[in-house]
Image (cartoon, rainbow, N blue to C red):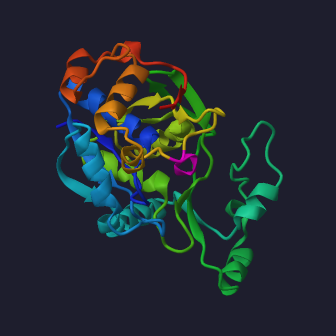
Amino acid sequence: MSAGRYAPSPSGDLHVGNLRTALVAWLFARSTGRRFLMRMEDLDERTVPGAAEAQLADLAALGIDWDLPVLFQSSRRDRYDEVVAALTTAGRTFECFCTRREILEAPRAPHAPEGAYPGTCLRLSAVELEAKRAAGRPPAIRLRTDVGEFTVHDELHGDYTGAVDDFVLRRGDGTPAYNLAVVVDDAETGVDQVVRGDDLLASAPRQAYLATLLGWVAPTYAHVPLVVNADDVRLSKRDGAVTLKDLAAQGVSTQTVLDLMARSVNLADADESVTSGELLARFDPAVLPRRAWIFEV
């Protein structure tokens, strides 16, 4: 059965921008009869004990529900390794010993985006490769791609073509990379609708390409505008009272936050108080804004 999902990193409390994206993802999924899955992207060192439970409590307080079980990526490391091993057997990976600085400072092809992998280790000879291994630096595993770009369709942005380089599948410390894990998880849990912030739009072509390479159908996408502060900078926890807990301490209720978010996506009138169920009944992707929302209370 098809599904949508929300996939936060349990690194602390969700802020209003995170919560708004979760609400829109839930509306997209439930309005189309999909399951709504919750996935905790807890593969790196930023994970904070208790954060996952606090995030789920905040989502529930807004009236967002989800289908069990909650998936933790840390429980699936063996599966990610299996996928990397299969790609390696098929000749679709290579070892990369480059540091981030070396990649940023390396010459790039004309029009290549900043940070795009320049192919340094792809061209290593057998002798050079052995010397790199002998030096003791553990390599990252990169995908050996055969395209330079890939096109996806987005509900809000239309057709979007983005660069696809030889991106990392597994970091040098053994951690599965984001672009690998999300593709495997989405495909194997039935997620065929991905709704998330538009800061991740540029990642979609890489992920859709990898899904296709692995024989899966890429999901449909909807990348929603971010929430920003008064300086038009992406909202973050550094902006002060932007979590439900901090806002409550200032006398701003969860209901007020839900009402503000509803108005920001054109689903409620000024001064109207709503429930998540009412938003679901009136949800129409066509009315969603295409510009960032400035959060002010």
Residue 154 on the magenta segment: no
The answer to which quarter of the image holds residue 287 is top left
Image-based side of 16 in relation to 37, left or right: right
In the rendered structure, the answer to whether residue 144 lies left or right of residue 104 reads left
Residue 108 in view here: yes
Whether 15 is drawn above or below 285: the answer is below
- Taking the image as shown, residue 47 lies to the left or right of residue 100, namely left
Question: 125 above or below 143?
Answer: below
Residue 294 in the image: state x and y as whole percent.
Answer: 54, 28
User: Which one is nearer the viewer's eye here, 184 or 231?
Assistant: 231
Q: Position of residue 42 (x, y in %)?
A: 39, 62
Q: Is residue 237 magenta?
A: yes
In this view, the residue farthest toward the front is 251
Closer to the camera in the image, 123 or 26: 26
Residue 6: image quadrant is top left
For the residue pair 283 and 255, the one nearer the viewer reads as: 255
Q: Mostly what secondary structure, the magenta segment?
A: helix
Image location (x, y in percent) of residue 89 = 44, 64
Which residue is rendered at x = 31% and y = 46% of the image? 187
Specify the quadrant that holds the N terminus: top left
130 is higher (above) or lower (below) than 226: below
Residue at (69, 53) in percent of width and height:
117
The part of the chain drawn in magenta is 236-240
Q: Residue at x 47, y 32 (%)?
A: 297
Residue 214 in percent (x, y) is at 39, 48
Residue 188 can be seen in this image = no
**Residue 2, picture quadrant:** top left
